[in-house]
Amino acid sequence: MRWRRELTRGADVSTTEIRPATAGDAAAIDAVVDAGFASYSVWAPSGWQAPGEHASGWAALADGASPADRAWVAVTAGDHSVAGVAGVARTALRSKAIPHAPGGAVILRNLFVARAWWGTGVADALLAHALTAARDDGYGAVWLATPAGAVQARRFYERSGFTERSQHDDRPLGLRLVVYARGTHERAST
C-alpha cells in the first residue's frame, strides 16, 4: 500500500510507503519502539523504566509468523528509514494486557511513530492499514491497550473510533492501561 504525504521541511517533499516489516527492519523498529517508550517518562510515575528486551514481540510479528500475526512499517522514500511501526496479533486465549478481549480477537500491537513524524499522518496511515488487514482477514473488531497517562495516544485512538472498554494496572509494564476496541467496518470520527 502506498501512502503519500507531503511534508514541508524547507523545500523537501517526502513519500512514505507502508510495507510489511521484515527481520531486516528489527534494529530500526527497536529504535522507534525504544524512543516511544522513553517518551513515557514525561508522564509515567517517578522511577518508571521502559520494558527491556522488546517485550512487544516484534520478531514474531515480522515476516508474518501467521496470517493474523504481522507488522508493518512506514518507510520514508529518501533514506528508507522507519518512520513508524504497527502490528496486529491474534489472541489465542486471553491477552494479559487485554484480559477482556475475546479469544481469537485481533489486537493492535504497539503503534509507535518516530518523533520527527508525529502529526504528519503516519500514525493514521498505519492504523488504517492495520484495520483494513484485520477486516480483510475476517476479524470484526480490533482491541488495543494504551497507558492511561498517554493522553495524546488516547485522544488519537478515540478520534479514530475506538471506545474505552476497561482499565487495569499492568504489572509487567508498571502502568495503568486503558483497553479500547472498535469494529473494523466502522468509520473514524473526525
Image (cartoon, grey):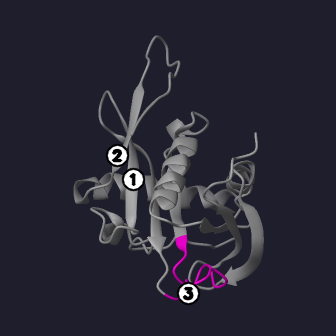
Give SS at disc 3.
loop
Q: Nearer the viewer, residue 138 or 146?
A: 138
Give SS at disc 1.
strand
Point out residue 38 in the picture as x, y percentages from the top left corner: 54, 59
- Note whether residue 45 is visible: no
Answer few, some or many: residues within 10 Å of disc 1's Cα (few below 14, many 20 plus, some between 14 and 19). many
Q: Main secondary structure of the magenta part?
A: loop
In the rendered image, the residue lying farthest to the left is: 24
The residue indicated by pointer 2 is 19
- Note whether residue 90 is visible: yes
Left or right? Give the position of 169 relative to 71. right
Point out residue 85 in the picture as x, y percentages from the top left corner: 44, 52
Pick whichever of labels 3 and 2 is earlier in the sequence: 2
The residue at 51%/80% (across/down) is 104
The residue at 33%/52% (across/down) is 20
**Which quarter of the picture shows residue 146?**
bottom right
- Magenta segment, which residues? 93-106
Left or right? Give the position of 57 relative to 113. left
The residue indicated by pointer 3 is 94
